[in-house]
Amino acid sequence: MGRHNEREKVRFQEYNDEYISAKYLDWDSNFFGVSSGKVILKQGLEGYDLPRVLELMRQFTFCTIQNTGNHPFNNAFIAGQTDAFLADINTQFVKTLKPTQGFEPSEPALLGQISDYYPKNEEIVEIAENAFVFSRFYNDEHITRLQARQLYANWVRNAFQKPNRFFITSMEKTRKVGFLLFSFETPDTIRIELLAVTDQYQNRSLGRRLMALLEEFARTRLVRQICVGTQVDNVPAINFYHKQGYMFRYGSPVYHLWSH
Ligand SMILES: CC(C)(COP(=O)(O)OP(=O)(O)OC[C@H]1O[C@@H](n2cnc3c(N)ncnc32)[C@H](O)[C@@H]1OP(=O)(O)O)[C@@H](O)C(=O)NCCC(=O)NCCS
């Protein structure tokens, strides 16, 4: 697949209301070499202009459709009216931080190192390349395993040296063996984007420690909640988040629609 022509973007209709949104995805279009977009169904679409929804979906060669909150009408609509297939159920978790009076961080020096504009780091890229084995992209035969793997490497590469993209890392001597990437969704909500510990170092409490550092950092910034999402078949991660005090919020089926 070649590089997708960015100027093509103007051909696509972007749309947003309280029921649906449709967006062209620059980065994905370049990565997959075909026009890619995302349509988010925010509520049940009973009574909505359904031909219009189909038009918005079919304008992209590769369209990701998210049925936020798993509305039954929308699932039936997608199954009945499109060739889309279920690629994933995105599973959302949240931890609400209780305000603690006179909070004193246990490791102010470490917390002081957590910042955005994180410098490029190939060790982190390598961890990302190897750690993520559950992904909706692995469930799609139009996407090669190599592309799916590279996707996570590119995700972190794109987060280096950027505002509002923060990294926390786990060190073994001088080597990085784990990382957590997060951003602020709003001033009082943090979203964990990626979390990974290399195979050999899993089950040694490094993941728990990364989460604990994030929580302390969040408290210093008066953050009220931390959110994280994962695939429903990433059972290890779901159990891990549960153990760290995260509550299941909702699941959203994610469909892939390819038009040729
Ligand atoms: C998920 C992950 C980050 C956990 O990190 P880790 O360092 O292996 O986990 P820890 O050793 O810190 O475990 C902390 C606690 O969670 C529990 N836990 C970890 N993995 C678990 C699993 N698969 N099932 C149940 N509990 C689990 C541990 O038993 C431990 O419990 P304890 O506090 O009673 O000792 C790591 O397994 C990983 O990198 N996975 C691959 C990448 C990934 O899928 N990331 C998440 C999606 S973005």
Image (tube, rainbow, N blue to C red):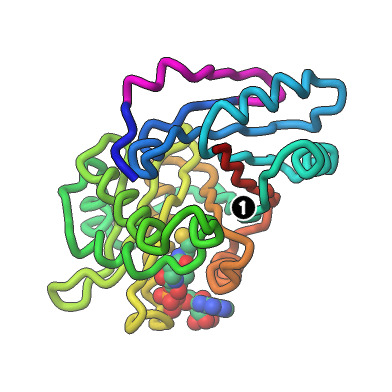
Residue type at mark 1: give it. Answer: Asn
Q: What is the secondary structure assignment of the residue under circle 1?
A: strand
Q: How many marks?
A: 1
- Residue 14 in the image: above or below residue 141: above
Which residue appears at 43% of the width and 82% of the height?
203
Q: Residue at position x 47%, y 46% from top?
A: 191
Q: Toward which corner of the image does residue 63 lie, by quadrant?
A: top right
Q: Residue furthest front?
A: 260
- Residue lying at 55% horizontally and 74% vertically, measured from the top left: 236
Determine whether, in the image, residue 9 is placed left or right of residue 13: left
Give the answer, above or below, for where 191 lies relative to 140. Answer: above
Is residue 197 depicted above or below 39 in this figure?
A: below
Decide if residue 208 is in sight here. no
> In the rendered view, does 31 fall on the left or right side of 97?
left
Instruction: Name the foreground residue: 218 vs 204.
Output: 204
| Residue 12 included in the magenta stretch of the image | yes
How many residues crowd around disc 1 within 10 Å: few (fewer than 14), some, or many (20 or more)? many
| Spot occupied by residue 21 in the image (x, y as percentages of width and height) | 61, 25
Q: Of residues 47 and 244, which is closer to you in this image? A: 47
Residue 179 position in % (x across, y down) = 32, 62
* Quadrant showing the C terminus: top right
Foreground residue among 253 and 116: 253
| Residue 12 spot, x, y in % from top left | 49, 19
Residue in the picture at 26% in, 42% down:
116
Q: Quadrant of residue 5?
A: top left
The quadrant of the picture occupied by the N terminus is top left
How far from the left and from the top, in percent, is residue 156? Answer: 30, 51
Report whether residue 3 is seen. yes
Reading the image, the residue beneath label 1 is: 90
Q: Which residues are magenta?
A: 6-21
Q: Residue furthest left?
A: 174
Asked whether 96 falls inside the magenta stretch, the response is no
